[in-house]
């Protein structure tokens, strides 16, 4: 997916385990198919997973997850990954990597959700619980978490460049108008709160039709809570989005910024991943379409 990503395979992971965690080295090791962009994932035995950054901007995620996820987990109503060990560079692999407890489930695409409204309420409850966790000392948004949680204005240049690159693929006038409307929303002036930073179907797990876990915390930080409203547009449709908003009980400005986050992330992801990651490109198209449809209804 990236021109400068590290080549990772079963042989490399096996060697890393053999030299650093020999007790696990002979367990079955299987690549996990994923639309994730930052890390390669391998199932280790029945109840563990090995996760290795594949690109430079993901370096540091393992250390952050090892520090913070065990502190967040007791406060949250859905399961999250629990780091078990951190590996160090070796065998030609340049970065720290992690071993985690395996979480059962499938990516929570809407065709795997039994009741979309129930899922919206469940996800809203999870986000609300996360925001209530004490954020003192938590990581501020920046390059370490892809800037998730910063003021939307910090994304203006990249978002406008993405809009220009999508000429002929989307309604760029409508996208520009929707983006500028989001920029006009009042900025967050409350205390920073915990955010996951990348809530979408690929980072949500479902079992038996219900949400059960939230994975991939590489974009976590403390900042503007609007960032975690993105599934209102990248996952849900209009009816379920209304249920989600009522359950979140957010003000108009935060909702408008959340719409801007969904639009910006969708616009930037679509041209980058349209050929290398069809799943993520599909999520981006859905988000853009939902935002533009809602923005047209709001302005009419």
Image (spheres, rainbow, N blue to C red):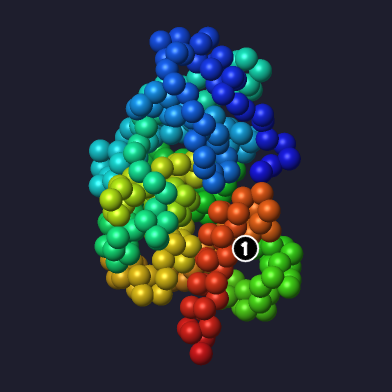
Apparent side of residue 6 relative to residue 118 in the rendered image (left or right): right
- Between 88 and 116, which is closer to the camera in this rendering? 116
In the figure, 280 relative to 58: above or below? below
Q: Residues within 10 Å of mark 1 (few under 14, many from 20)?
A: many
- Residue found 50% across the figure and 15% down from its top: 17
Apparent side of residue 89 relative to residue 102 in the rendered image (left or right): right
Image quadrant holding the N terminus, namely top right
Task: Tell me the element at label 1.
Answer: helix
Apparent side of residue 112 relative to residue 163 in the rendered image (left or right): left
Q: Is residue 87 visible?
A: yes
- Between 118 and 153, which is closer to the camera in this rendering? 118
Apparent side of residue 59 relative to residue 116 in the rendered image (left or right): right
In the figure, 76 relative to 81: above or below? below
Percent from the top left, x then y, of residue 296?
A: 53, 83
Per the image, the residue denoted by label 1 is: 267
Kindly indicate the quadrant of the structure image that contains residue 265.
Answer: bottom right
Percent from the top left, x then y, of residue 192?
A: 41, 52
- Residue found 35% across the figure and 70% down from its top: 240
- Residue found 53% across the figure and 9% down from its top: 19
Percent from the top left, x then y, of residue 72?
A: 32, 39
């Amino acid at each position: 997916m990236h021109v400068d990503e590290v080549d990772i395979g079963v042989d490399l992971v096996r060697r890393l385990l053999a030299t650093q965690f020999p007790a696990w080295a002979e367990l079955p090791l299987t690549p996990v198919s994923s639309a994730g962009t930052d890390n390669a994932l391998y199932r280790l035995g029945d109840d563990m997973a090995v996760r290795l950054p594949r690109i430079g901007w993901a370096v540091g995620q393992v250390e952050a997850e090892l520090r913070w996820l065990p502190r967040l987990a007791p406060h949250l109503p859905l399961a999250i990954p629990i780091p078990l060990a951190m590996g160090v560079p070796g065998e030609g692999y340049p970065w720290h990597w992690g071993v985690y407890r395996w979480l059962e489930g499938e990516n929570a695409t809407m065709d795997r959700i039994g009741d979309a409204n129930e899922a919206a309420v469940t996800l809203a409850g999870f986000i609300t619980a996360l925001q209530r966790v004490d954020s003192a000392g938590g990581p501020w948004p920046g390059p370490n978490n892809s800037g998730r949680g910063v003021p939307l204005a910090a994304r203006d240049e990249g978002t406008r460049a993405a809009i220009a690159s999508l000429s002929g693929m989307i309604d760029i006038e409508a996208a520009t108008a929707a983006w500028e409307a989001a920029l006009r929303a009042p900025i967050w002036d409350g205390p920073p709160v915990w955010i996951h930073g990348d809530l979408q179907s690929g980072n949500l797990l479902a079992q038996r039709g219900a949400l059960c876990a939230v994975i991939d915390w590489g974009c976590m930080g403390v900042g503007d809570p609007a960032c975690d409203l993105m599934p209102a547009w990248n996952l849900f449709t209009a009816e379920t989005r209304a249920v989600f908003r009522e359950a979140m009980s957010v003000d108009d400005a935060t909702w408008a910024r959340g719409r801007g986050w969904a639009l910006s992330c969708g616009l930037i992801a679509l041209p980058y991943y349209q050929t290398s990651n069809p799943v993520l490109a599909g999520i981006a198209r859905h988000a853009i379409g939902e935002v533009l449809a809602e923005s047209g209804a709001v302005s009419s």
